[in-house]
Image: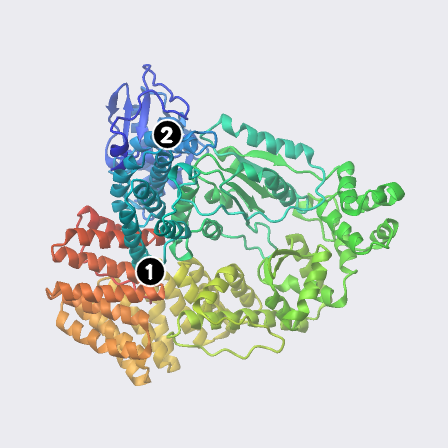
Amino acid sequence: MLERVVDGAAPPKNGVAGTRPRRRAGNGVFMEIRVLGPVEAWAAGRQVEIGAPRQRAVLAAIAVDVGRPVLVDDLVDRIWGEHPPQRARHALYVYIARLRRALAESDGRLVRRSGGYLLDADADLVDLHRFRSLIAAAHEPRRTDTDRSSLSRRALTLWRGTPLGDIGGDWADRSREGWRQLRLDAAVTWAQAELRLGNAGAVVGPLTQLIEEYPLAEPLVVALMRALYASGNAAQALENYAVTRQSLIEQLGADPGPELRELHAMILRGDAADPAHTPPAVPTGPEAPALLPPDVPGFAGRDRELALLDAILAGAGEHPTALPIVALSGTAGVGKTTLAVHWAHRVAERFPDGQLYVNLRGFDPSGTPLPPAEAVRGFLEALAVPPDRVPAGQEARVGLYRSILAGRRVLVILDNARDAEQVRPLLPGAPGCLVVVTSRDQLTGLVAVEGARPIALQLLSATESRQLLVRRLGAQCAVTEPGALDEVITHCARLPLALAVVAARAATQPLLPLSGLARELRDAVGGLDAFDGGDASCDVRSVFSWSYRSLSPHAAQLFRLLGLHPGAEIAVPAAASLVGVPGPEVVPVLAELTRAHLVGACAVGRYTLHDLLRAYAAELTLATDTAVARHAALHRVLDHYLHTAYGAARLLEPHREPITLCPPRPGVVTVPITDPGAALAWFATEHVTLTDAVARAADAALATHTWQLAWSITSFSNRRGHWHDQAVVNRVALDAVCRTGDLVGQASSHRGLARAYFRLGRHEDAETHLRRAVMLAEELGDLPGHARAHHGLATVLEHRRAYVEALRHAEKALALYVAAGHGNGQAEALNGVGWCHALMGDYRRSLACAQRALPLLRKFGDRHAEGSAWDTVGYAYAHLGRHKRAITCYERALRLFREVGERFLAAETLTHLGDVHQLAGDLDGARRAWREALTILDQLGHANAAQVRAKLGGTPTGDGALRLSAV
């Protein structure tokens, strides 16, 4: 292990450099809780008895959040997972009482706080937090390389083996995976510092050992290649590159990253940089993300709030283990986002590892806040995590997100939050970062539990309002028309959003005197009703209506219809579809709305509205446009999303049974997508809007759009692990088509729900929906749909080990595909029959079926199903004792799965490959394959990771032959 190689000494006894001294126990000696190995507590130089594994798990579950309350529900989830016993809370209270007695002689107290329990102690009492503090200190710019090496080395000595080594369960597994990333960061930091100090020879051995454990960790490989090159062993460096490149291609379907490729090229040229002149870098991070929206020109006022923010940042160093959080609250339109973004730009250089920003849509007019899991996904992609490596579940995503941010200085802006619950999963887990949350809610829970610093934003003062207008309109207006300036401020009631709209209008009409603008405002009628329970002191409809009436007819029409659009962002083709004109014609109209400050450009070709303006646009279209016009506009924009999504889905799954769409209405503009990569990119950009579109279609009684949109989203959702979303949209679709009696839509929605529930491990629910799909397909006379439902039932029943019944459904699917003349489905079902025979132990019949399926699948070009057939052949050969032939078949299956980006089945095949290596006596080959499978399953947050982890640990797990193929 690296930590033993770089420093064989025991962990320091009297605190560690770069951290606060640990609190002493009551008898005058240090107390310590250790989780970076078996869970232990030490006091007075001896180990404290803390009970059985479950009780130790309780201590660990609280200790990892030392100083912060852990809610009882969260503790139950961490200890028992999704299926706790009936008396879990009682058991928890018993464990807490015992732990209190065990820790009675120390200053580490377990106290009840805010609906949970808190370990009231210095953070450095817990080795995990000492580890994080040391790494954070090593990354401080003021540190010398000697400091960096020493701090990183001391952090690594805290690692005593497998973290939480005597604790099982999903939470422990997720935590271990995140902490392993911290260990990698520490190792890379140490290696880079040693290289710059000229100690290349000291780096080679430890890194070589660690790379055996983490063969795909490119920063480790970079450091090792630099060390080998600096030691005069360029040939070995190039060999390491070749091995790593091959592993990346085989396991991830990707080439090495730019840093590794560039180093390889430099070594080939003989001009690799001297390690001593290589600047320190963030160990495993990508290029620093910079997601901040543009700063607003002409920012004015808010001196008090800016000073408070500066003070919070300056004081962050006084609490090195705490995460600084600012809760910036205030009414709609008061300028929370503007202030947060302006301040973020001012201090961005203080956060060299990047700035993250997300609009959480907490008070979006659609009523659908952004789920935290989606926000974390966006952050992970900004942090250069490949989309197909983003875990499926929220907790796994959060764990990866926090691991990546550990030891880094990143500014996180969480804009427009609904409440504290939406925010908590997005908080980094370690110091070094700073979070600013904006919300109309006061976020009292975040203040009470997480210690957020509240800043309540009020309306601008009269002086600040004048500053804002003067900076945007020029100083002359204050000299020549001070009365008009004050009247404008009065009509806008000092609300920044209203003032910005007026300033935009004035800027576009420079010949109109300010007094004329004031008169128009005076004459404007109506306004948005008081919002947020009357906490705004002005009627902003008068300001918005005044600006709206200045628009050209085309711009006014588009603005109104934007109130119908599902989602907060809209691209040019969707906007063109709303109004029924070609794309180029809508671009100048959007530009006019942008100049009027009624929409904002958020990316190239994409626009967004403030939620108050969306609400106003929805009011306008309801009052101005006829029901027929509104329905036509909504129908066109839903046609845009449906036809574009369907085309993209066909590129992702060309062998899936097609559905029949109605032609798009006149005026609909679709996005031309020509390859799977472009299809994935479009889906990634529009995923949230598409989910909203399903709900909007259901609300508008457009049931066909509802189920066909859900069908079209499924291919992308399956690839990216959006199974919860997939279940939601198919549930909405099923309700919609049940109301209209659409049997085709019902059958599709039942299959879609089954597919989602199967991936989520809800096999009984999946079976229920598939049985209903079978009945509907039979009633409709839909032979391919009938066959697909039986094929899905066979897959679900395999996972429930009902092999005889599974075989019956697989054979029924085959017969139906033959009757339908569906060649590709027939071949896939033939392999399904073969797989059932394999699970029942009839390996020769299994082999015969799968070998008959292979040439048919190659004929139809279905590489996905061909990979499954090769896996079946390999499985049969393995159980017939023909191990070499089985390995060859598994490797062919693996290549096909990687080609099509099917990571689930690649993990299954790697598991089988490890099994056959074990049968053949090649234990090293078995562990390599299992480790690769475990990496994929952990990244995807899949429950089968536990089975593979048990194989690596030598624990029996059953036959391990459960197929992950799609329902």
The residue depicted at 35 percent of the width and 66 percent of the height is 900
The residue depicted at 49 percent of the width and 41 percent of the height is 353
- Which sits in the foreground, 332 or 271? 271
Tell me which colouring the rendered structure shows: rainbow
Quadrant containing the C terminus in the rendered view: bottom left
> Which quadrant would residue 387 be assigned to in this image?
bottom left
- Labels 1, 2: front one: 2
Q: Residues within 10 Å of mark 2 (few under 14, many from 20)?
A: many
Q: How crowded is mark 1: few (under 14 residues within 10 Å), some or many (20 or more)?
A: many
Above/below status of 92 relative to 609: above
Q: Residue furthest front?
A: 270
Instruction: Mark 1 or mark 2: name the one nearer the start of the chain.
Output: 2
**Residue 134, position in %: x, y?**
39, 30
Q: Residue furthest top?
A: 28
Q: Which amino acid does label 1 sit on?
A: Arg
Above/below status of 958 relative to 953: below
**Residue 274, position in %: x, y?**
39, 40
186 vs 569, left or right, is: left
**Residue 730, position in %: x, y?**
44, 65
The residue identified by callout 1 is: 903
- Disc 2 is placed on an element classified as helix
Quadrant containing the N terminus in the rendered view: top left
Q: Which amino acid does label 2 sit on?
A: Leu
- Which sits in the foreground, 878 or 618? 878
- Disc 1 is placed on an element classified as helix
The residue identified by callout 2 is: 151
